Image (cartoon, rainbow, N blue to C red):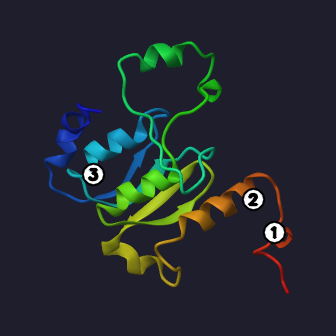
Amino acid sequence: PQNIVSLLRPVLDTGEELDVLKVDIDSYDCPVLEMILPEVKAKIVLVEANPSIPPPYQWAMLHSPELWTFFNSFHSPEEVPIRGCSLAYEVQLLRRYGYDLVAFGGHDAVFTHESVRSAFLPYDVPMDEFDCYNEAFIAANGIPISRTADGSSS
């Protein structure tokens, strides 16, 4: 993660705000994002979140020189037992830079900068991370929302 800003320097030197920034590297996504956010302002940030870690748990895989040796011991990335970072970790990290959670789809979280918040009205931004996580979990497992406690029509 330490060299990400130098890799992005040609884009950063333009001084322009990015429309979209996406971080999805199946490993230490949040440490990379922590290096980028002080240097880059984007209207929308998409970042992969580990769906196996529910809110309120905050967890992030940190960088280690041995990480690639560990990853290479698996046949495919899906076999790696835990990677990335939790939705709750991302929410607290991105809030520090003025970003609101607007959606979570099971593996990807979408954040918008407060400067474009009005574009997402009439939605109640920022979205609640617990609600987003629960709705994504329910949808991913094929459970009709009407069969959940919040989806009752009583």
Report the Cα–Cα distance between label 3 and label 1.
Answer: 37 Å
Task: Find residue 46 and report its horizontal and vertical position in percent.
Answer: 45, 53
Q: Residue at x 61, y 29 (%)?
A: 81
Q: Are marks 2 and 1 in contact (CB under 8 Å)?
A: yes
- Which class describes the residues within 10 Å of circle 1: few (<14), some (14-19), or many (20+)? few
In space, the residues marked 3 and 2 are separated at their CA atoms by: 31 Å
Q: Where is residue 75 shown, x and y percent of the image?
A: 63, 16
Badge 2 marks a residue whose secondary structure is helix
For the point 23% across and 39% down, which residue is it?
8
In the picture, the quarter occupied by the N terminus is: top left
At horizontal 20% and vertical 58% (from top left) the residue drawn is 16
Q: Please, what is the three-letter code of the amino acid marked with disc 2?
A: Ile
Q: Quadrant of residue 115?
A: bottom left
Task: Give the number of the disc on residue 148.
Answer: 1
**Quadrant, the C terminus:** bottom right
Q: Residue furthest front?
A: 57
Give the tally of numbered discs. 3
Quarter location, residue 41: bottom left
Which one is in front, 51 or 6? 51
Where does residue 7 sit, x and y in percent of width and height? Answer: 23, 34
Number of residues whose C-alpha sits closer than 10 Å to that of mark 2, classed few (under 14), some (14–19) or many (20 or more)? some
Rendered image: mark on residue 138:
2
- Quadrant in which residue 5 is drawn: top left
What's the residue type where badge 3 is placed? Leu
Find numbered disc 3 in the image and state the secondary structure of the residue it sits on.
loop
Q: Pick whichever of labels 3 and 1 is earlier in the sequence.
A: 3
Task: List the residue tagged with mark 3.
Answer: 37
Residue type highlighted by circle 1:
Thr
Q: If you read the primary sequence from the N terminus, does the residue marked by circle 2 or circle 1 appear first?
A: 2
Q: Secondary structure at mark 1?
A: loop
Label located before the other in sequence (3 or 2): 3
